[in-house]
Amino acid sequence: MDKRYTGVEIHKGSLQGKLLISQPVANSTFFAQSVVLVCEHHANGAWGLVLNKPSIGIMSKNVAQDLDLEYSGNDACYIGGPVHADGLHFVHTPDCVASNTFWVTNNLCVTSSVSILQEIINGRGPTSWRLCLGISSWQAGQLDGEMKGETPWTPQHRWLTTDVPNNILEKPVKSIWKESTAVAINNSVNNFF
């Protein structure tokens, strides 16, 4: 596998490489208590992956079996979002990359190639990884509108934001939302004063 560093250039105003954290008062059923890694955000829209919603009943070994690969690990699959539910993306550390690896930050990559799973099976995969099914996506201007709470969106559509911790894939899934919410609120308060 190619292990070269490609770097990440993030444009002003972009939320790429940030976490979106649903507010405690969020109206969305799907995104309630969600933490979304923003993989890409620009004038044409945005997409990301929910990092803290394990699938009920679907494990990585089930996905491997569907792809005719042998993998016996008990790693959970995560519901990355409500769009393209059959698409799979690996969020992973950059110590193993493929030809279509997308660098979200300097410490976190996303790859949609099954070759990452093959590398994991062969013992050469990334140190930390999470397999997500589906994505979260926003049309042009939609995420910006949600962040501003402008019509047709409301203040309850606003996301809390924070930087992605380097060890996000090592954090206990059940505590990611609460911990990220606390960090985002603390950062907002510190910026206000």
Image (spheres, grey):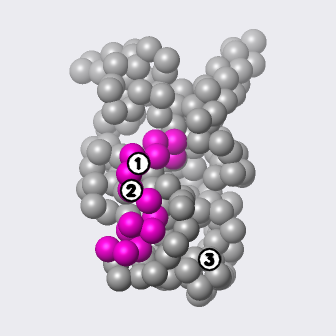
Residue closest to the eye, 75 or 169: 75
Number of residues whose C-alpha sits closer than 10 Å to that of mark 2, classed few (under 14), some (14–19) or many (20 or more): some
Q: Residue under label 2, please give it.
A: 58
How many numbered circles are shown? 3
Number of residues whose C-alpha sits closer than 10 Å to that of mark 3, classed few (under 14), some (14–19) or many (20 or more): many
> Disc 3 marks which amino acid?
Gly
The answer to whether residue 91 of the structure is visible from this angle is no
In the image, which disc is placed on residue 112? none
- Which image quadrant is residue 12 in? top right
Mark 3 vs mark 2, CA separation in Å: 21 Å
> Disc 1 marks which amino acid?
Ser
In the image, which disc is placed on residue 55? 1
Mark 3 or 2: in front is: 2
The answer to whether residue 24 of the structure is visible from this angle is yes
> Disc 2 marks which amino acid?
Ile
Which region shows up in magenta?
51-66
Q: Are marks 2 and 1 in contact (CB under 8 Å)?
A: yes
